[in-house]
Image (cartoon, rainbow, N blue to C red):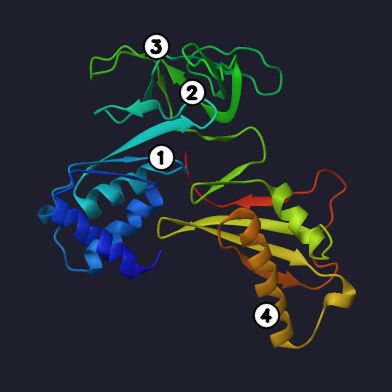
Amino acid sequence: MSSGNTERQIQFMQDLGATILCCTPSYAAYLGETVNEMGIDPADLKLKAGIFGAEPWTEEMRRSIEKSLGIKAFDIYGLTETSGPGVAFECSEQTGMHINEDNFIPEIINPDTGEVLPDGEVGELVFTSITKEAFPLLRYRTRDLCVLSRKKCSCGRTLIKMSKPMGRSDDMLIIRGVNVFPSQIETVLIAEGYAPNYIIEVDRVNNSDTLDIIVEMKPEQFSDKVKDMQDQERALALAIKTMLGINPKVHLVSPKSIARSEGKAVRVIDKRKLHD
């Protein structure tokens, strides 16, 4: 989204006297940066709180958003397969999300064995939907790794709490709120005539996810002309964007330059520090 559109959205919030902001945390961080660039004092905004989800974010990012927008930032968890947003939510304590147990039965399992784990241990979150009728789910595996806790909460709620997701038990990445599988990228590479030798690097710069894809060329694709290489990178980046819906940065490298492995190839390097 352009900075002009973002500035207009901030002006709309001012004109309408908006008190609650709901979006992805990375966009909230961008709004905060734009507020600062526009010379607006966060205290002059009527915003009181923000509800953010759809992508992983750190405590450091929370504090940055709270400072830049002058709000309290709350986490929310949901799954399209269950009911969308609102499966779990943070309270004023901000130490985990209360799960709506009147609608869902949560469990933590060992992702390798399926064994149910006790509260306090890290494992894969599983949900059973007890009120959904059109598409009920029984012991649905979310693939999100987290911890459940029934410790007494100062807010007075007795609903079980889940921690922020600490990672995934599969190879899915969440980048700028979009679910990305390495297999999607591999499909594009093969369709565009490249060999499936690649590395995906994900990082977070200024509270925004970055996606870099290093792709090994075949001998016949290599060129010593910079413009030819740049044209190929742009074309491949566009094809990947069409598949994923987000802009990657593609880096074409010479044949045989990506290390081979006798075991399972390491395709993904996630440099984001999203949890301890």
Which residue is depicted at the point 60% across and 12% down?
A: 116
Where, by quadrant of the figure, is residue 247 drawn? bottom right
Q: Marks 4 and 3: which is nearer the front?
A: 3
Which mark is first along the chain, 3 or 2?
Answer: 3
Which mark is first along the chain, 3 or 4?
Answer: 3
Determine the secondary structure under disc 1. Answer: loop
Which residue is depicted at the point 27% across and 57% down?
A: 32
Which residue is depicted at the point 39% across and 11% down?
A: 102
Query: Could you tell me if the residues under marks 4 and 2 are in contact, i.e. CB atoms within 8 Å?
Result: no
Q: Position of residue 257 (x, y in %)?
A: 81, 67
Q: Is residue 52 above or below residue 128?
A: below
How far apart in space, not on screen, are marks 4 and 2 (Cα)? Answer: 45 Å
Q: Is 6 on the left-hand or right-hand side of 142?
A: left
How far apart in space, not on screen, are marks 1 and 2 (Cα)? Answer: 18 Å
Q: Which residue is mark 3?
A: 102
Q: Amino acid at mark 2?
A: Val
Q: Marks 4 and 2: which is nearer the front?
A: 4
Task: Rate crowding at label 2 as few (under 14), some (14 to 19) or many (20 or more) other CA atoms within 10 Å.
Answer: many
Circle number at residue 53? 1
Circle number at residue 230? 4
Query: Could you tell me if the residues under marks 2 and 3 are in contact, i.e. CB atoms within 8 Å?
Result: no
Q: Is residue 174 above or below residue 68?
A: above
Task: Rate crowding at label 1 as few (under 14), some (14 to 19) or many (20 or more) other CA atoms within 10 Å.
Answer: many
Q: Is 263 on the left-hand or right-hand side of 180?
A: right
Q: Amino acid at mark 4?
A: Gln
Where, by quadrant of the figure, is residue 164 drawn? top left
Q: Marks 1 and 3: which is nearer the front?
A: 3
Q: Which residue is mark 2?
A: 147
